[in-house]
Image (tube, rainbow, N blue to C red):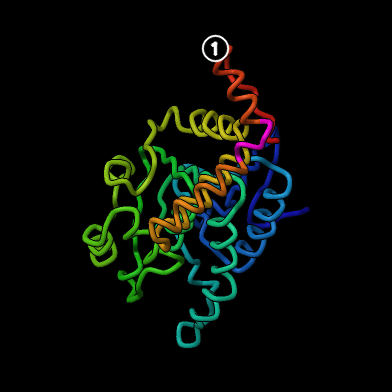
Amino acid sequence: MTWTAITATTADGIAVITLNRPQVMNALTSVLRREMLEAVREAQATARVLVITGAGDRAFCSGQDLTDAGHIDAVDFTRILAEEYEPLLTAIAESPIPTIAAVNGAAAGAGANLALACDVVIAAERAVFIQAFTRIGLMPDAGGTWWLPRQVGLARALGQALFAEPVSAVRAAGQGLIWEAVPDADFDAHWRRRAAQLANGPTTAYRAVKQAMRASSRHTLAEQLALEARLQGECGRTADFREGVAAFLGKRPARFTGE
């Protein structure tokens, strides 16, 4: 596959999709979203973990490229969000394999919420997260109104959305917005180690974790307990479970195969 707005590679079970428009801080266009959706679907079929990152050091993604949205008097955000953003964000959030956003720089607007669609966000300390929408008279979209209150609570979500101020990676980690902030010099090697850890882990268990965690907010306790019982039954029938127990009893590292 030839890409024009992204790069995509897969090695050792790790698929890496890189937003590749560094000259405009990896801003999102229709072409980029289409290519990214195709690459996400490919990764889910061939890899054991998916990493999304940005080219360069300045930005992970600066959000929607406004020059790509059409004339300001005729831009149809409803169509763009429904037809282009929703399929991509849903594919990432509901991915059967673990997803990591390796946030190498600024993540603004839809770019910030693209990162939050991933299971785990690892950011360089130079990164900032900005719900920049109100700066141009818009409200958060691309899932921001869903992820933000769930990650940081309503008060902080409203503060970020209304004031549209940058939140440093260190502060974001402290608030629970992201998983961790990493010193800039260690960032690349660190997220690669994290991705390798997941790629070598128990695939069925990871899929069950994702399914159960994401279902919990819409379930009663009884429904969630029933889901846990069903999913744990599936995990207990895997070769990875047998290997995990054998490794524990043998006091050695487990060698999971994803089976």
Q: Is residue 90 magenta?
A: no
Q: Quadrant of residue 223?
A: bottom left
Up the image or down, 230 lies above or below 68; here it is above
The residue beneath circle 1 is 251
Residue under the point 35% across and 75% down:
138
Q: Amino acid at mark 1?
A: Lys
Q: Residue pushed farthest top?
A: 251
Residue 181 position within the rendered picture, expressed as x and y whole percent measured from the top left: 37, 37
As helix, strand or loop, the secondary structure at mark 1 comes to: loop
Q: Residue pushed farthest right?
A: 1
Q: 9 left or right of 28?
A: right
Residue 37 position within the rendered picture, expressed as x and y whole percent measured from the top left: 64, 60
Range covered by the magenta-colored residues: 235-239
Q: 178 left or right of 1?
A: left
Up the image or down, 113 lies above or below 191; here it is below
Quadrant, the C terminus: top right
Q: Residues within 10 Å of mark 1 (few under 14, many from 20)?
A: few
Residue under the point 27% across and 57% down:
153
Q: Nearer the viewer, residue 138 or 100?
A: 100
Residue 90 position within the rendered picture, expressed as x and y whole percent measured from the top left: 56, 62
Dominant SS in magenta: helix
Q: 205 left or right of 3?
A: left
Up the image or down, 259 lies above or below 43; here it is above
Residue under the point 41% across and 41% down:
123
Q: Nearer the viewer, residue 197 or 60?
A: 197
